[in-house]
Image (tube, helix red, strand yellow):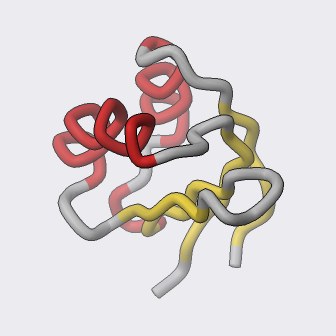
Amino acid sequence: MKTKQFKTNINCSGCIAKITPVLNPLLGENQWEVNTGHKDKILTVALENLDENSLVEQVKTAGFKIESLTEK
């Protein structure tokens, strides 16, 4: 599965709980994850479900920072 990664400031379980109702409808359950242990709080999403502009807009609307990284 190809993925796209984003640098975020989603840094704790409370943040995950806040962003889950935003990302699940947009990307699908189990189609994204945040590595809160990484210094850049990497959000990884499945490419087949990705509307990048919508994703960035929704994450920012939820109050988080997001910056596109590279495809894997």
Rendering coords of residue 12 (x, y %): 51, 45
User: In percent of the image, x 57 and y 40: which residue is there?
Assistant: 10
User: In percent of the image, x 60 and y 43: which residue is there?
Assistant: 11
Q: Is residue 43 above or below residue 8?
A: below
| Quadrant in which the C terminus appears | bottom right
User: In percent of the image, x 48 and y 27: which residue is there?
Assistant: 59
Question: Which image quadrant is residue 3 in?
Answer: bottom right
Q: Nearer the viewer, residue 23 or 36?
A: 36
Q: Is residue 43 above or below residue 23?
A: below
Q: Residue furthest bottom?
A: 1
Question: Which image quadrant is residue 23 in?
Answer: top left
Q: Is residue 2 left or right of residue 48?
A: right
Q: How many marks?
A: 0
Q: Nearer the viewer, residue 44 or 54?
A: 44
Q: Nearer the viewer, residue 72 or 41?
A: 41
Q: Is residue 67 left or right of residue 62?
A: right
Q: Nearer the viewer, residue 53 or 39?
A: 39
User: In percent of the image, x 67 and y 35: which residue is there?
Assistant: 9
Rendering coords of residue 40 (x, y %): 79, 51
